[in-house]
Image: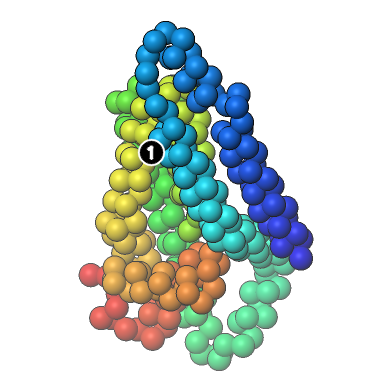
């Protein structure tokens, strides 16, 4: 209920912001009209109505995109909060929960089950850290080439956000791009944004499957399939848990064809 309430407030205020921007554009004293008057005063005849119309379209399109993206953002945020809560209880009562889970497993399979869980969870966490580290290093090198201020700090920011499955990388890149826009202007910001998107695509399609192949010992096709199924079933929580669960299943069933070479 709280998240629905917050979402409604955000949606309402975004619509109000869009209306305010459109109202400013439509007013007689908007910046475009002021520029038009300044040009006319200098005998420069340029019709800026087309620019004003295009700005209107951009504002409406941008707000519609944000409003459409908002439910996914809230869903991802809720999933992340659930992960934090589960992690907290695992830290405080982890031993009791673990013993309860083991009691559900046949006695002759408990050791094997415990080994599979520990190996795959630890491997997954190590893989996530390694993937984020690689992205941080690559981002730092790109930002250094583009002469972005504070390249190390911004690259670390991208890497930390990347630890959050699903929406984390997008949020990190968006935040960093806005910071660069304020610091260095739109040209450098656009270059950095394009570079970060390219790095993310390389990470998601080439680096991440290979890293998970070595840390969780899963075939890359199994990793892709697990992520797809996990996302469809449980959203962000599914993204976070799908690979370790797949690793445990493959280990327990000893399906060698699905394990990494």
Tell me if 257 is positioned left or right of 35 in this view.
left
* Picture coordinates of residue 15, whole percent (x, y): 64, 49
Regarding mark 1 in the picture, which secondary structure is present there? Answer: helix
The image shows residue 251, relative to residue 65, as above or below, that is below
Q: Image quarter for residue 237? A: bottom right
Q: Image quarter for residue 126? A: bottom left
In the rendered view of the protein, which quadrant contains the N terminus? Answer: bottom right
* Picture coordinates of residue 250, whole percent (x, y): 38, 80
Comparing 215 with 186, the one in front is 186
Q: Which residue is mark 1?
A: 193
Q: Image quarter for residue 90? A: bottom right
In the rendered view of the protein, which quadrant contains the C terminus? Answer: bottom left
The residue that appears at 69% across and 52% down in the rendered structure is 12
Tell me if 74 is positioned left or right of 116 in this view.
right
Comparing 246 with 19, the one in front is 19
The residue that appears at 29% across and 78% down in the rendered structure is 258
The residue that appears at 44% across and 62% down in the rendered structure is 124
Comparing 209 with 39, the one in front is 39
Say if residue 26 shows up in the picture. yes
Q: Outermost residue toward the top?
A: 42
The residue that appears at 35% across and 62% down in the rendered structure is 212
* Picture coordinates of residue 207, whole percent (x, y): 30, 54
């Amino acid at each position: 209920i709280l998240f629905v309430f917050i979402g409604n407030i955000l949606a309402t205020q975004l619509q109000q912001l869009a209306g305010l921007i459109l109202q400013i554009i439509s007013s007689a004293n908007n910046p475009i009209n002021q520029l038009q008057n300044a040009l006319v005063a200098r005998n420069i005849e340029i019709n800026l109505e087309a620019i004003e119309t295009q700005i209107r379209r951009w504002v409406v399109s941008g707000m519609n995109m944000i409003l459409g993206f908002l439910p996914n953002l809230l869903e991802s945020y809720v999933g992340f909060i659930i992960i934090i809560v589960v992690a907290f209880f695992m830290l405080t009562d982890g031993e009791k929960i673990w013993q309860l889970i083991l009691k559900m497993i046949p006695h002759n399979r408990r050791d094997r089950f415990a080994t599979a869980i520990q190996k795959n969870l630890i491997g997954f966490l190590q893989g996530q850290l390694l993937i984020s580290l690689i992205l941080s290093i690559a981002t730092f090198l790109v930002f250094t080439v583009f002469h972005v201020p504070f390249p190390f700090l911004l690259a670390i920011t991208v890497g930390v956000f990347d630890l959050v499955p699903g929406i984390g990388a997008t949020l990190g890149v968006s935040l960093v791009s806005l910071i660069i826009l304020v610091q260095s202007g739109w040209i450098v910001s656009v270059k950095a944004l394009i570079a970060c998107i390219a790095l993310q695509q390389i990470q998601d399609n080439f680096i991440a499957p290979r890293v998970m192949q070595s840390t969780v010992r899963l075939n890359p096709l199994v990793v892709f399939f697990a992520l797809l199924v996990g996302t469809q079933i449980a959203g962000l929580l599914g993204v976070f848990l799908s690979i370790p669960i797949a690793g445990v299943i493959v280990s327990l069933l000893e399906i060698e064809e699905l394990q990494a070479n």
